[in-house]
Amino acid sequence: MTAPSRRLVLGCVAVTALACGDIAAPSRSDLYEWRLQAPSVPGPGLDTLSFHWGQDDLPVRVWVEDAEGLPGYMAAAIDVWESAFLYREFQATLVTDSAGADVIVLAGAPASAVRGRRLHSALAPECTGATDLDVDVEHRQLRLPIRVFVASSLPDDPGIDRCLALTSIHELGHALGIFAHSPNPEDIMFADPDVALPSARDQRTAETAYHTLPTLEAVRLEPLE
Amino acid sequence: MLRPILIPALLLAAGTGVLHAQTDYYARVGAVGANTLVRDAIGDEIRVRQSIAPMVALGASLPFSPGYRAGLEATLASGGFDAEQDGVGETDLGSLRTASLLLGLDGPISSSLRWRAGVGGVLYWPSEERGIFLEGGPVRFLAGAGVDWRRPVLASWDLMASARYDFHRFTTDELERRGFAQAQGVSRISLSVGLARGIR
């Protein structure tokens, strides 16, 4: 075979391979543990608890107390997390009636007594956040609503807007199903986050959480009218 | 990317006054179907697919040698798209419009059949900049071919039926940003009927 013929054949093979190849999905191995480890009741060991909102639950209804600008921060946080997904796995909307809300966001520090588990986070000087999860004793049900608390500690501090914004994103991250903290300071789900937006690792973790069978089912104690 | 198409298009448009008598115009309506846009794997395989979409096509061509013509064909289709995952089902991702412009040649097969082939571009125009289209819809290089069947129905009008196949490589800025490599080969097939100003 002559050199020009060889080049022609190789060219045709390359074009054919290029035309037939499929898109290659990225590896999503670089993520962190999002599930909550909780002592088994009764019995030894730990239960791994995971949760995500199902397609039938969407859009998740979020009621936000109208204080400290929280509705605006939470609307932005919803937009940020919706954008973290490629296939509309998570969607949320702000509602005006707290009675039917799946997530309730309150301004201020949480009460000391908590019915379920409390995920503390964002313990910055300017503001703090917490998310309360009411999980039944058998670790099968997540009772709604999830309660989120965002409190400004230094309302006049110049960094308060940024702190409230990233804390809102962080706490909504817990409410959408990332129940654990990232060990990486570059992630929004780090225990004391200092970044403004979810990292690629946060996105991969959220995506993986939404494509993993959850152990908890969301239930409402009082059915909606 | 569309510059190689737009310049001849403008020249063609400018020349239509002079060459009006020889210009062939047509309009068709029909439907277009495409195969998978994106294959992903998060646990199970996820496939993003477009629904079969209604489309309109407009075109014009000029003769450049006996029996052969060169022209432009534009199509616009609007349909839905969804993500399908084994064991989960389908998730509606909204509506998606595609517009294509093809610079092509056509020639005779028989008295009522003509072949057509061309290259151009396809633009994806989603209803919302979300998900795989978070950073907007892409414009991709497109190659296509097909056949046209014509039958005179009026003094200067032909009934026209067309079948088209085209191929392009699909990806988006958002998919690339997230580490998707290469691009997905997308084949589209359309069937349409319409009217053409007959050139006798």
Image (cartoon, coloured by chain):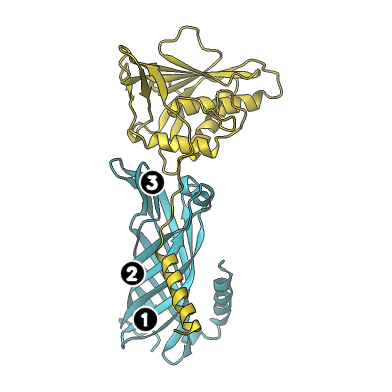
Instruction: Say which residue label 2 marks.
Output: B192
Relative height, residue B132 to residue A32 (above, below): below
The amino acid type of the residue labelled 1 equals Trp
Q: Which mark is residue A159?
A: none
Q: Which callout, 1 or 2, points at the residue further toward the start of the chain?
A: 1
Instruction: Say which residue label 1 marks.
Output: B115
Q: Position of residue A187 (x, y in %)?
A: 56, 32
The amino acid type of the residue labelled 3 equals Ala
Chain containing the residue with disc 3: B
Q: Quadrant of the C terminus of chain B?
A: bottom left
Q: Secondary structure at mark 3?
A: strand
Q: Position of residue A176 (x, y in %)?
A: 44, 29
Q: Nearer the viewer, mark 2 or mark 3?
A: 3
Q: Is residue A225 visible?
A: no
Mark 2 and 3 residues: CB-CB less than 8 Å, in contact?
no
Q: Is residue B77 visible?
A: yes
Q: Quadrant of the N terminus of chain B?
A: bottom right
Q: Secondary structure at mark 1?
A: strand
Chain drawn cyan in the picture:
B
Q: Which mark is residue B41?
A: 3
Q: Residues within 10 Å of mark 1 (few under 14, many from 20)?
A: some
Q: Nearer the viewer, mark 1 or mark 2?
A: 1
Do marks 1 and 2 share a subunit? yes
Chain drawn yellow in the picture:
A
Seen as rendered, the residue at the extreme left is: B87
